[in-house]
């Protein structure tokens, strides 16, 4: 029987996280963690559906939902098996549709919409194969993996032939690494202790709680006020000590000279990296910052807002980052992430994914485990972000072994929200939002 995509719906799901300062940073002071949430069905009566989010911070989610709706005619009615058999070609068809491409191309709202759709397709693909996504990818041959990638614009760094060779080099030992990650998990760091909107008392309390749980890697938000950053960094070091790792993240707040001077002031706190020190599109600015901070032992990390594989390619070529941060919803889903992992491997740059948000932890740990098994072959200098919020809203929340992510066992991309969650948090008519509007805490 031919399997056709018979339906594609999108929902605007929002959580009022701004009420307690969760997710707050120097640029995004009042985020409401949200997502445009795609559900794909087929003509086969097997109960399987694909679920795909793209993460947002509240306002604007409705714009992405409209972009998803504009792409529906290019997805519904398509033969599912033909899509996954030649995934790279379908990816280009969707991301380069001749008219919608104009409002991208391969970036911004239209690319976020493509990511949600493609995430749902990958979720359905893994479910139909009865495998978690990381295992689906790990079991693919190098040729199958390469066929998922659109190499346009990156062949000056990695060609199909080179990509196949990189993947072939890991084949003979990947089962050993698969066994290792299943037994030990993948290392994580926590951001949940030090959102910018937290009081000093809350910061101390959360650091102590995290230490009691075994955390040894911490990230703090900075960038709004230098003296505040010094005070908060002092508190962080008092609480976590000097033996534990500390990372800093200013979320694009600074100009290039500001980033350099600010981080020289904070170098005394021995941060491992400064994340998103300036505009995510400023490739040469990042390179200038990286060069200036290298003598202080501070690396540059970026990627959660990098638009596509082309920006990552140039970042790598220019030496703009020492830690590459992928995001499962910012670029064009798994297809483009494979391309980015391959380029990172070629430049020997560690991949440390951005996570948190809505379902980002759940999605991205699949990608890191695949990277370890089949692309990089190592966990050295690699770590995945962990944020504890909203776990009870997900059907398949991440499982941890201490402070390590464990590989998922359930088929799919771990991308489902619970039915109750959708009912309560769909914007603007969900039960929770109706109550918030009535109370006056939010306004439409």
Image (cartoon, rainbow, N blue to C red):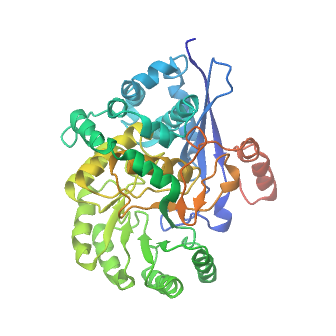
The total number of labels drawn is 0
Of residue 94 and residue 386, the one placed in the foreground of this image is 386
Of residue 292 and residue 180, the one placed in the foreground of this image is 180
Of residue 48 and residue 431, the one placed in the foreground of this image is 48
Q: Residue sitting at 49 percent across and 34 percent down? A: 118
Residue 279: where, in percent of width, then height? 35, 59
Residue 2 horizontal side relative to residue 432, left or right: left
Q: Residue 414: tell me if it is visible.
A: yes
Q: Residue sitting at 33 percent across and 34 percent down? A: 142
Q: Tell me the quarter of the picture where residue 254 sits.
A: bottom left
Q: Residue 154: tell me if it is visible.
A: no
**34 versus 296 height, above or below:** above
Residue 224: where, in percent of width, then height? 46, 74
Instruction: Kindly give the residue lying farthest to the top in the view shown.
Output: 1
Q: Residue sitting at 27 percent across and 79 percent down? A: 296
Q: Residue sitting at 38 percent across and 63 percent down? A: 276
**198 versus 4 height, above or below:** below
Residue 125 horizontal side relative to residue 427, left or right: left
Residue 31: where, in percent of width, then height? 58, 59
Residue 75: where, in percent of width, then height? 51, 23
**224 versus 102 height, above or below:** below
Q: Quadrant of the N terminus?
A: top right
Q: Tell me the quarter of the picture where residue 170 sits.
A: top left
Instruction: Kindly give the residue lying farthest to the left in the view shown.
Output: 156
Residue 194 horizontal side relative to residue 260, left or right: right
Of residue 265 and residue 86, the one placed in the foreground of this image is 86
């Amino acid at each position: 029987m031919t399997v056709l995509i018979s339906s594609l719906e999108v929902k605007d799901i929002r959580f009022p996280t701004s009420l307690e300062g969760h997710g707050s940073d120097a640029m995004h002071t009042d985020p409401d963690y949200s997502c445009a949430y795609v559900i794909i069905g087929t003509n086969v009566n097997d109960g399987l559906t694909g679920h795909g989010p793209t993460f947002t911070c509240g306002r604007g989610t409705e714009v992405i939902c409209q972009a998803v709706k504009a792409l529906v005619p290019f997805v519904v009615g398509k033969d599912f098996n033909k899509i996954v058999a030649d995934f790279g070609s379908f990816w280009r068809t969707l991301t380069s549709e001749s008219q919608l491409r104009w409002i991208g191309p391969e970036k911004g709202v239209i690319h976020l919409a493509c990511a949600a759709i493609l995430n749902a397709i990958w979720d359905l693909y893994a479910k139909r194969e009865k495998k978690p996504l990381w295992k689906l990818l790990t079991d693919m041959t190098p040729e199958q993996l390469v066929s998922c990638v659109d190499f346009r614009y990156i062949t000056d760094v990695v060609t199909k032939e080179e990509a196949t060779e990189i993947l072939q080099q890991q084949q003979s030992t990947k089962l050993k690494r698969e066994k290792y990650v299943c037994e030990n998990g993948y290392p994580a760091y926590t951001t949940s202790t030090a959102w910018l909107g937290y009081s000093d008392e809350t910061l101390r309390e959360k650091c102590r709680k995290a230490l009691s749980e075994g955390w040894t890697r911490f990230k703090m938000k900075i960038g709004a006020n230098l003296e505040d950053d010094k005070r908060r960094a002092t508190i962080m070091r008092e609480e976590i000590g000097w033996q534990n790792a500390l990372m800093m993240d200013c979320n694009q707040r600074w100009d290039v000279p500001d980033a350099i001077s600010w981080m020289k002031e904070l170098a005394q706190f021995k941060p491992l990296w400064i994340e998103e020190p300036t505009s995510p599109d400023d490739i040469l600015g990042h390179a200038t910052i990286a060069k200036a901070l290298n003598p202080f032992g501070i690396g540059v990390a970026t990627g959660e807002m990098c638009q596509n594989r082309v920006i990552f390619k140039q970042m790598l070529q220019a030496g703009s980052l020492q830690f590459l941060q992928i995001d499962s919803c910012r670029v064009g889903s798994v297809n483009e992430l494979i391309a980015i992992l391959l380029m990172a491997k070629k430049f020997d740059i560690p991949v440390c994914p951005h996570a948190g948000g809505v379902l980002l932890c759940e999605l991205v740990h699949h990608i890191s485990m695949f990277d370890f098994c089949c692309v990089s072959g190592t966990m050295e200098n690699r770590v995945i972000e962990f944020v504890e919020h909203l776990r009870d809203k997900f059907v398949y929340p991440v499982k941890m072994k201490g402070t390590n992510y464990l590989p998922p066992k359930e088929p799919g991309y771990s991308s489902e929200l619970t039915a109750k969650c959708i009912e309560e948090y769909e914007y603007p008519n969900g039960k929770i939002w109706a109550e918030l509007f009535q109370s006056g805490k939010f306004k439409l």
